[in-house]
Amino acid sequence: MADKTRGMFAPVLFPYALCREIVDELGAQALFLLDSARLIFAGFGQFPKIVRQIYFIGVQSVTVIALIGLFTGMVMGMQLYFALSLFGADGFLGAGVALSMVRELAPVLTAIMLTGRAGSAMTAEIGIMRISEQIDALTIMDINPVRYLVAPKVAASIISFPILTAFFDLIAMWGGWLTGVKLLGANAGVYWSRVQSSLDWDDIEGGFIKAVVFGLLVCTICCFEGYYTHTRSGHAGPEGVSQSTTNAVVKSCVVILAADYILTSLLW
Amino acid sequence: MNGAPSIRTQDLAVGYGGTPVVSDLNIEFPGGKLSMIVGGSGCGKSTVIKHILQLHTPISGKIFIGGHDTSSMPPRQARCIRQRSGVLFQDGALLGSLRLKDNVALPLREHTRLKEAQVMEIVRDRLEMVGLDHAMDLFPNELSGGMRKRAGLARALVMDPRMLFCDEPTSGLDPIMSAELDQLLLEMMRRFDMTMVVVTHDLASMRSLADHVVILGEGHCLYEGSIDDLEKTQDPYLRHFLDRKTEERDAPRLTLPPLDPSMFKDDCSALLGDTTLRKDER
């Protein structure tokens, strides 16, 4: 009888169950983030771990961010030059490149690149530690695994994402200058003067806020997926870790773009 | 607390996702003795240990450590118990990013006020005890399986534990190395006054080490008592288990004929001979 009733209401119950699952997971991730953020300041022992993570997330990503920034800037310089010169407005090239980079492209592309390079590695590392009982070993030694493993990554992300975003901004503007000015012949003085005059503090602050928020989101999602890899039904062991890593990257990218829309609406 | 604490379970049911693996468990691991949990694969030996260590919450029932109920224990007391419990996991569970010396030093650095020189002195002593003082600077992936287990034991012992839990310490080791590890566990028992619980299905280890034996099977405790009484048992399941006999119904049988050599995509019969025929058919 109960089965019959459940079958009858299945079309209603399925969306309900799905919504409940999503809300449950969001709640769990929010608590996970709060816990790890609180534990960043749990003693001086955290400092060397944070420095190590900054090296891994930040320093080791410099080359890839420089390359992506350079090519993005070069493409923007070229496309904007062609579009603006149709109206005789190629003098606004610097403003176009600078505003699009600082407000939108640099925070989003940096976050997506860091998800692929560092976020996936975080999920895989924590996931492997979970399935090889290393996290259980930490718990039994009365070492809080969230404090030991996750909190330094969260702190390092908050520090590294904005710095790499700023670095992306600079390289991309230089890339725009390379194609727009050096290759296509726009005026160099006008380009740099428009870069300077079009950007105000709100733009830079907005880009910085976006970078910090993306850093928190990417780190939380990636660490959460790895930490709870053993609860993934139907996927145990290495397969579970690979599934968690894929999920972490996909979720992070979607969340970055969704959060970008919300932040853009709120900030400007 | 005087002497090593005893561990007792009362109507304990443990499992995952609400499904019990072992239930109605009323056993006691006496303080200061070496107890062994024995049973077939998948009977819930490691699950019981993980619940005693509070890595999972029991479905029902209680666990008492040194007479204190762990479910109603204040967090501070629970932390004390965890800090003074050592665990040797099946594969050592060493942190892959830390050198051996840092793995062993980790609990000391986290929970004591010792200076770095004192920490390293203790680390060196424990690694010397397990014969790994020469490998202090190696990473876990540079160690063999046996070395990883001994390193795990060194880490488990570094806080002078009052309870030591070993999850299948001899699995995957050759007989000589297994005997060496057994010997090492006995030495640790003599040196430290502690309660040791070892999960195993190695009968040789059980016979040479155990003061107290618990046998699990069919979802509950089949035997609890001394090794001498166990050897005298006439219970059919226990006898099969102890004598390593297979039951008639479980005896493996080859019912299918061997594969025709022509069915293999790569024909290796000239190289290896016709390996698919059974000895009696050649």
Image (cartoon, coloured by chain):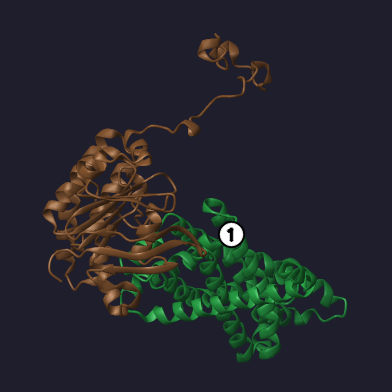
Chain colours: A green, B brown
Which residue does the image show at 65% across and 74% down from the upper left? A22
Quadrant where the N terminus of chain B sits is bottom left
Res B277 quadrant in image: top right
How far from the left and from the top, in percent, is residue A24? 60, 76
A200 with respect to B157 (left or right): right
Question: In this rendering, is residue A160 above or below B35?
Answer: below
Give how far across and how far down residue A78 sits, in percent: 76, 69
Q: In the displayed orientation, state which residue is furthest to the right.
A: A86
Question: Could you tell me if residue A265 is visible in this image?
Answer: yes
Residue indicated by mark 1: A233
- In the image shown, does B137 or A201 lie closer to the viewer? B137
Mark 1, other Cα within 10 Å: few <14 / some 14–19 / many ≥20? few
**Callout 1, which amino acid?**
Ser
> Callout 1: helix, strand or loop?
loop
Residue B57 in sight here? no
- Give above or below for B248 relative to B178: above
Residue A26, image x, y percentages: 60, 77
Position of B268 with respect to B120 (left or right) is right
Tell which subunit mark 1 falls on. Answer: A
